[in-house]
Image (cartoon, grey):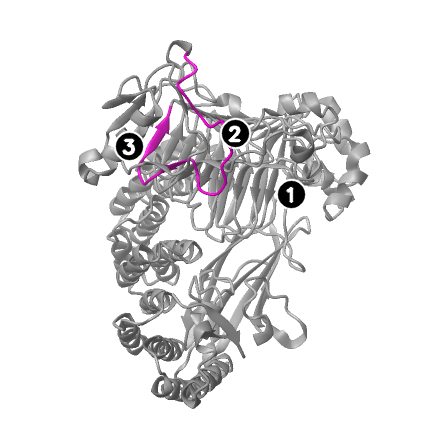
Amino acid sequence: MMKYVLLGLGFLVPLGCQAADTAAFKGFTEAMAAGEAAMEARHLPQAREAFEAAGRLAGKDEERASARLSMGHTLYHDGRYAEARAVYTEVLAMPGAAADDLFYARQFTGHSFVQEEDFAGALQAYRDTYEKGRARPTLYGNVRNDIIFAYMDAVSLGQRLYRLGETARAEAALKGALALEGLPAREQSLAWLTLGHCRFHENDFTGARAAYEKVLDLEALCPDGWDRSEAQLSIARSFEKEGRSEDARQARARLLTLAGAHPNHRAEAVDRLKAMGADIRAPIQGLDAEYGAECNPTGSPIGGGQGYARIVTRGDQEVATLAELEAALQRLAGMAPEARRGKVVYLKPGAKINLAGRTGFVVPSGVTLAGNRGQAGAPGPLLYSDAHFEGYAALSLEADARLTGIRFQGDAAPFKELFGIWPHGYFSADFFEKSGRKKPSATAVRCGDRVEVDNCELSCFQTAISVSGYDIHVHHNYLHDIHAYPVVFNRGGARDPLIEANIIDWAWHAVATADDMMASLIVRYNLFREVAPNLWGQGVSGQFAVDHHGMGVRFDIHHNTFLHLDRQEGVPNRSICLAPPWDIARMRNNWFVDYMTADEATYWSMQQPVKTMVDLKAIVTRRDLSAHMKEYLENIQDYSQFDVRQIVAMTRAGVGGQNMWVYNNAYGTERDVLDTTIFTTPHIFFVSPTHRRVRTRLGQGRGGTTNPPLHHLRGEVPIDMQVEVLRPLTLKRVTIDLLTVPDDRLYSGRYIIPQGDEARRLYEGTDAPAPGAVALDTRRLPNGVYGLLVTAEDSRGIRADHQTYFEVVNPAGR
């Protein structure tokens, strides 16, 4: 593949062609640069003329393909999707086309189907792009996100139509979404829930309940309690509509037993049951009345080992040496996927296998690599490496593989041994060189889609488990002496992974995700203990048990125990660091064993600027607080400091946080409970237009990230969003502003801060407008990229800001 150099306004020129000082090549590059400039200025007819000229002047197939690809982009941004696909098909048929051009031709074919709401066609194009783009890791992750967005958009279409009252069209869209191959469980749940609402609206209560029951049946695959509580609440309402009050009462009572129910749904159920004369003494029941990991309902001990319920004790092939292990894995790799599915390679009890610095061992798809950790107290067979390695992971698990019941140890010394030779605990950057100790090897295990890692002990690596796939389940493991990342998710690989019932010691970032707007996490029943020593100069301010940068979609962090004490600073370490998601982040039922004292407030206020609210104590609901905690709360002047030690809400410059609900957590050794904290903000969710960040360049795909595609809007577009607050808080003010996005800030991928006349007020009220009550007439706007900024303020004065972006594409520029 040819290398490119930057020319002019972002067009990339083949490096090898620079020396070709011919009139034709000069004309080609000038025409491409002119086309690119016209594209950025949205002069699409002129851009097409320039790219047509570039195609005529092209001296090589690769140049011709680049010109045609750019021609396809002009048609795409003009809303002529079928014509654009025809051009992209031409590019795919050109034998000399560059690999990147082939990639973008396939990807934009998918984008064009999304704009036409043909999600089956989009998924087929994206899957083709994905399979042919594996050699490019960054692009590979982007297309995986495109696939998920296509699924989400398919369900979102049905939700949008339902909220606008078009139930017949909504049902058709939702049934089409449910028919899509590979629809993730989360999207299945939302589709069935909305389908139930459509039938409810049509007074088909029996049909509605059948759809709601589908949501309840998905609990094992989609452990999101909010969908289930809404379904259960809707079942109760359907019984009320039919005059079946006793069935309605029983349905609401069942809602109170659902783990992770939406707190507002629970509050409504309690209010209705009390109105019906029911004796509700403990509205929070079951797991939601428990705090920390100790409630562990999984049936196996936290960290695995003795008592684990799914210990493997035999296999199809049993191995005890490196040669036997390598031969067994290679033999299975040579089999058809269907033939090897369910096969087990079993490491014999007591086996000790030295990988000696070798990497690239692969557990094929559908295969389990197992040991007997926990059987009659057995420690499990040992994989280890006494030689340092960098780069690729030692062990890679392909899709649907499982790693269970083994110990895996890297070549770095345990931290306690390092403290023995460096007792003050601060490890400078040159520590390893000065001490003669080994740096930790790179990565122990890399995971593909639907991989399971359970009942293992991993230690003494830089990274223990690196995730590059969807639907990962990491549970009942003991991870310790990992220098950086016990569990880390790479870009395009953190789609609702379940991290549960692990013990993680000595962690810098115990569970971490990359800067990925598609990242989601479910973290529950884990015990996080001491943080790592200051190996990389981070110290107390940079270590978090759960850490996510970027935006992300949805986080549910509950029933974890955080026991952190920083060795260097002698003060408690913060536990969670999240950037505001575009859906919701829930932090509930956790037990933060360490907490700050009033004397530490000044120190922490330097770490995180937060809003001081002296009168917050009149609003924060307190339940069963000990005398010590009551005195603490009444004395401290800055209530926000109470939780900044535990949870840091990252914000974009100039834009407040949003969509963070921190509620029903326990603090301190006496497990004092706070119903909410200052980090609980209004929840804003875009329905129409759906959420998008500014990440798309108009010109050559090579110049910037091209996913997810901004939605193309034309004509009059209804505006719809959901805005809610945690009860008993109430909404005080909601505003909606239209943002004009200047070209010089179009490609940053960051929030756009409105300046001067760049913002135009569309709505202001005490609640979100009803669906479709506010509409945007795009015909009054020049074609281009715009945004919506929604601001919501609750009864405490806490504000949330949320944004989405879209591209206006009306015929003939209007």
Local secondary structure at mark 2: loop
- Compared across the picture, whether 243 is left or right of 548 comes to left
Mark in the foreground, 1 or 3: 3
Calculate the distance from the C-alpha at mark 2 to the C-alpha at mark 3.
38 Å
Mark earlier in primary sequence (2, 3): 3
- Which x, y percent locates residue 520? 46, 45
Placement of 71 over or under 751, stated as above or below: below
Please check the rendered image and state whether residue 503 is part of the magenta-colored stretch, yes or no. no
| Boundaries of the magenta span | 378-404
Q: Earlier in the sequence, mark 1 or mark 2?
A: 2
Specify the amino acid type for callout 3. Answer: Leu
Q: Earlier in the sequence, mark 1 or mark 3?
A: 3
Circle 2 is placed at which residue position?
Answer: 559
In the rendered view, does 464 fall on the left or right side of 363?
right
In percent of width and height, residue 303 lies at 47, 22
Instruction: Confirm whether residue 258 shows in the render.
Output: no
Tell me which amino acid carries mark 1.
Val
Residue 648's disc number: 1
Tag in front: 1 or 2 = 1
